[in-house]
Image: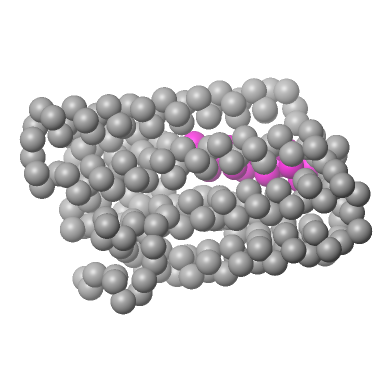
Amino acid sequence: MFRDFISIFSTDDPLGAMGERFTRMLAMTGEMALAAGRIYFEGAAPPDERKRLYAQDIQVNKLEREIRKLIVAHLSIRKRPADVPYCLYLLSLVKDVERLGDYAKNLSELIDIGGGRPPEDANVAELRTIRDHVEQVFRDAPDIVTNGDRERALKLIPEGRQYNKRCDELMKRVGQSPYDARTAVALALGARYYKRFGGHLLNVLSSVVMPVHKLDFFDEDAIPRE
């Protein structure tokens, strides 16, 4: 069924309009996450960059509402039962993508807690490695979803799980390190937000390989064969 779902990204009917908006949402939240990462790791928030990030979040929220409205109208007017699963896919996925925008905002605001650039130590080096992975998934995700690239999704999902575990371990190490309170909070929350980025991106990638009733879960035994 997912092969049919992927076709909505290349059709001109209302489903195509939903797919186009979803792709825009995903790309925009990727831009937001990259901007938030720069603010967080550089310890500075140029007013224009933060203002642009907040404006993008408003656009992401608007796109989510537009997609929901299109789904309700499509199911109410066209009454095509075959389209219901695809609409359910999108209803689930747009919420994940909307949350990505929220966490980008949250990450950018941590400099108000930490008070500047994070210290250069092993914990921050690990967080930078996690950041690099998450930002690469943000770059790859729109193409993977739009083209239904199962091979890349199947590669990234287990990797993402491992990076999420690294976030958990990093938060523990930060809590056991002799940081001052502001630094500890900023680092622990930074690790937490990158874990949430990773978790919601995994949910999005799961849509490429899992049936609609198992979105957000990755069970190799449940993956439909091609």
Q: Could you say which is closer to the camera, residue 112 or residue 19?
A: 112
Q: Could you say which is closer to the camera, residue 189 or residue 42?
A: 189
Q: Quadrant of residue 11?
A: top left
Q: Name the residue located 13 percent from the left edge and 30 percent from the top edge.
A: 76
- Position of the N terminus by quadrant: bottom left
Please check the rendered image and state whether residue 30 is part of the magenta-colored stretch, yes or no. yes
Q: Position of residue 162 (x, y in %)?
A: 57, 69
Magenta stretch, residue numbers: 28-42
Q: Position of residue 59 (x, y in %)?
A: 47, 26
Residue 35: in sight, yes or no? no
Q: Is residue 137 left or right of residue 20?
A: right
- Position of the C terminus by quadrant: bottom left
Q: Name the residue located 87 percent from the left edge and 56 percent from the top edge.
A: 120
Image coloring type: one colour
Please check the rendered image and state whether residue 36 is part of the magenta-colored stretch, yes or no. yes
Q: Position of residue 122 (x, y in %)?
A: 82, 64
Q: Is residue 4 above or below residue 177?
A: above
Q: Is residue 173 above or below residue 187?
A: below
Q: Is residue 6 above or below residue 58?
A: below
Q: Name the residue located 31 percent from the left edge and 41 percent from the top edge.
A: 91
Q: Name the residue located 60 percent from the left edge and 59 percent from the top edge.
A: 133
Residue 185: in sight, yes or no? yes
Q: Is residue 161 above or below residue 90?
A: below
Count of numbered marks = 0
Q: Quadrant of residue 20?
A: top left
Q: Position of residue 182 (x, y in %)?
A: 85, 43
Prevalent SS, magenta region? helix
